[in-house]
Image (cartoon, grey):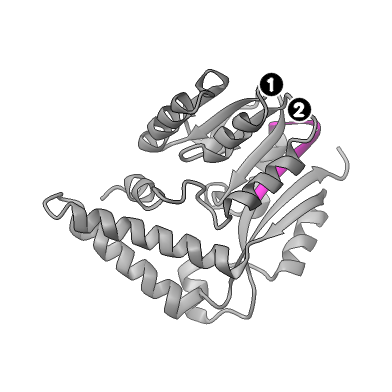
Amino acid sequence: MERSLMSQLAHVHHPIASPLDDSSVARVLARALDRGGERVLDLGCGQAEWLIRALERDPATTAVGVDLAAGGLAEARRQADARGVGERLVLEQADAAALVPEEPFDVVISSGATHAFGGLTGTLEAAHKHLAPAGRVVVGDAFWLTEPSPEAVEMLGEYEDLADTVDRITAAGWTPVYGHLSTRHELDDYEWNWTGALSAWALDHPEDPGSADALKAATAHRTEWLRGYRDSFGFHTLVLRRTEG
């Protein structure tokens, strides 16, 4: 099964593709979009749930979402139109890392998509290219809560603890003005939703050619989570401003 379709199915019950609950998303958006009427860009928007919620909270906000996955963008369009914000949302099927800067944005979001930019530092560099002066970046990425096992590092990649992560961000010229650390409930709820939604779809569609692959992927993911990285994995969502320049 195509990876983007699998992700779409896995996020049916958790459209924010990061381990934050609804109240946490609302708090982050309130801190990032605190002036009203902002132009917002999401690099790697998926189903554009961050943007749709930003548009719902302020009728003067406009937004652009960029992603490669056609299926996610189609669902984003359907949701935006159904929720009455479609006229203020532009969706582009393109490589977010290669997007050419045009008119700057007041807020740039990239949550759970740092892999597309080669990591956290690359994500911030890409966001900066599109950011207006005094603008804000919302970035969500992993960090290690405790010393990870070699298996956890192999599964998820190289990360740092929270203090070193923030030091790296500030050394790159950014200042955190707000932050949210996903709670144990948020982390677990995200994983149960991801694996559960994908498993349920596979069980409900046994004749679909992708059913076996979906169930296999959900089972493998659940095992990796519970036996591999659950105790060491953390997730931060930071609102950042440029320290200078």
Identify the residue shown where x is 46% and y is 78%: 228
Disc number for residue 106: none
Foreground pick, 220 / 75: 75
Q: Is residue 107 visible?
A: yes
Q: Is residue 16 left or right of residue 181?
A: left
To which quarter of the image does residue 170 belong? Answer: bottom right
Q: Reply yes or no: does residue 112 show up in magenta.
A: no
Q: How far apart, in angstroms, are the residues tagged by discs 1 and 2?
A: 7 Å
The residue beneath circle 2 is: 36
Residue at the top extreme?
A: 87
The chief SS type of the magenta part is strand
Q: Is residue 227 above or below residue 199?
A: below
The crowd level at tag 1 (other Cα within 10 Å; few <14, some 14-19, many 20+) is: few
Which residues are drawn in magenta? Answer: 130-139
Residue drawn at x 33%, y 69% as measured from the top left: 220
Q: Which residue is mark 1?
A: 60
Q: Is residue 79 above or below residue 241?
A: above
SS category of the residue bearing label 2: loop
Q: Is residue 138 inside the magenta stretch?
A: yes
Percent across and percent down for residue 144 are 63, 71
Q: Nearer the viewer, residue 166 or 80?
A: 80
Position of residue 100 in the picture relative to residue 239 (left or right): left
Q: Which of the two labelled residues, at mark 1 and mark 2, occupies the earlier sequence position?
A: 2
Residue drawn at x 51%, y 80% is 150
Q: Amino acid at mark 2?
A: Gly
Q: Are marks 1 and 2 in contact (CB under 8 Å)?
A: yes
Instruction: Check disc 2: other Cα within 10 Å, few if <14, some if 14-19, many if 20+.
Output: few
